Amino acid sequence: MPELMRNDSKIRLNTTDASIEIVRGSSVFCFSGNGFAAGDAECDGERIRYLLSSPHFPLAVCAVLRFAADGNPELRLSAEGAMPQAFEYPGALIPKKGDLALIPAGEGFAFPVDEPFIPILPESAWMGSQTWHMALIASLRGDAWIALAPEEGVDASVRHERKEELLHTQLCWQAQRGSWGYERVVRFLAGDAGGLTGLCGAYRAFREALGQVVTLQEKRKKLPKLDRLIGAPDLWIWPDNYENFMYGTDDNAELKPAASDILRIAEELKAGGCGKALMGIFFAGDQDAARDIAERTGFLASKYDNMEDELPGAVAPLISPARIRECDYTERRMKYWPRDTMRDADGGFTGAWALRGRDGVMHAQNRTCPYFVEEYTRAEVPAAAHRYGFDAWFFDVMGCGSSECASPEHPLTRRECVRNRRAAFRVLADNGLISGTEEGSEPYLSSFCYCEGKMSPALYRINYRESGRRKAHLYTPEEHERVFDAFMLNPRYRIPLWELVYHDCAVSYWYWGDSSNCCPELLPLRDLFNSLYGQPPLYSFHVSDWERLKGRLLESAAHASRSAELTGYERMVSFEYLSCDRLVQRTTFANGVSVTVNFSEKEFCLESGQTLPPLMDLIEEKT
């Protein structure tokens, strides 16, 4: 068995089944090899070279195991030729009962690998997507930990399966436009102490060494207005008839502009003691409120935009002209169809967000190829932002996932897709605009300032497939779903995985279809998560809801935003459970601020002797 050793770490290759052992101190982690054979193995003391082959995979793959410059084991994989299926190696970590699988969906979850019911996990998920925000596969084994971290995850996915009643998760390398494309590199990060905090510190150091981490403080050099985002609640205020206007079938549907109401509510927020806010504006008819919001309240005004959804020519006559007008991005996107439309590998147009036509049928839109996104952003956004007085710009779906385009006129790989979208975000920064996006996955983190949806893992939202349309719906307890109640706000499973790595790099919000107030009775519980994670709340409601929600939202904004105001530019440096049932939790930030939350229904006695009441938090500043 070829072996490499450095300090307290070892790499071992089993040439019989290509399995790999990573040893760190007293901890041993084994990756299965996934049925490959390791031939022609050579070890020169610095690296182990071998050739991977399998009757189930058409290419011979050259593998090199070695210690990288940071002292962690590294696997490099290279091949040439067509790649008709995913390459699954080094195989799954062989789990042990009691291990915790760390799932980077939204803020993060820790699931026991022997948990029988984990509905958040689809059979597979793309890294950097809505359901797997980071290029990371990780587990805790007591206080020890292991992580697989690809240098680039845009052409990689994860696959889950159960074997012997335990969860196995493995890395799947995907083709780049049908071929192997480029060398694939993955780092093994491991430790025998430190738990979740130690793992996240090592992962952050790995990404920093690759130049992939840009903090909010660095972004602030171009964007001094960023100070107004730190600790700012995010608000989306909708005309009362927006759902019927957007998704109904009335030929004569019109939208009553809400600009004056949005401005009025912003002024009432200010008068009620809310010092900061981010006011989202969706419809074209409401844009006139932006400049007045900034001048009268000092709040940020952000315009919703969409550089992806493209209305096909055959569908356009079925959509209300008023809707096309008010969703002003629609007019801009549809005028280029089909010249700039993304195509799939079969040559067909790629589908996008569906609209209800006046015939009552849902019609899929097409997708604009990201090849053009920087060009369109530069041509369209700065002038519009200046005209109406916007300080911020929100790109829907821009900062999550990546796509290939098979158009012969504008072919695109996933890596090129990411680069082009990052360039579009840079256009915003170059023009003084604070950038926001939906979800905000890791490949785009260096380029945006805030994201909506990170606090709301997609698969746990109530009626999650329709949650993007039900932006202002207030759910009754009877409308809850089992998955939502079991996991969305369950502190036994949720962990601040994302925040431990990237808290100082972006502001993270809930989703507008899963807002802080969408289940009014759960607003105090969401406030506790905001406080613990050092992130501000998001509210989404109809204009007519404001009067009855006003008092509760002002109270919530003051409570839920305080730790975000204190820690917005700071790293989260630790997370710990203070009780055996995991319901009393504490986060600590680089400036010494700590937040302790008691999620239980019983009082908890802290180390200081102070009693923390049920469902309460304690924010302590370093003196």
Image: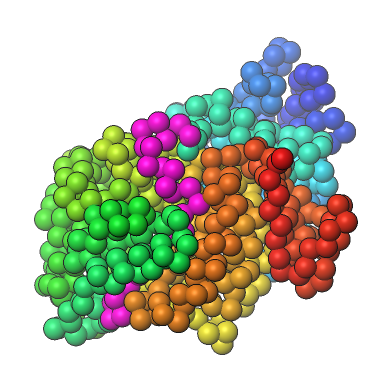
Q: Of all residues shown, which one is farthest toward the front?
A: 271
> Where, quadrant-wise, is the C terminus in this rendering?
top right
Q: Farthest residue to the bottom: give it.
A: 478
Is 107 or 16 nearer to us in this picture? Answer: 107
**Residue at position x 30%, y 57% from top?**
296
Which segment did they paint magenta?
A: 217-242
Please give left or right for residue 397 compared with residue 288 in the image: right
Report if residue 175 is visible in the image. no
Residue 372 within the segment the image draws in magenta: no
Where residue 441 sits: x, y (%)?
Answer: 47, 47
Which picture quadrant has residue 548? bottom left
Res 576 seen here: yes
Query: Quadrant location of the N terminus?
Result: top right
What colour scheme was applied to this rendering of the protein? rainbow
Q: Give coordinates of residue 295: x percent, y percent.
A: 28, 53
Given residues 282 and 36, the one toward you in this image is: 282
Magenta-colored stretch includes residue 236: yes
Locate residue 97, reporting x and y percent: 82, 55
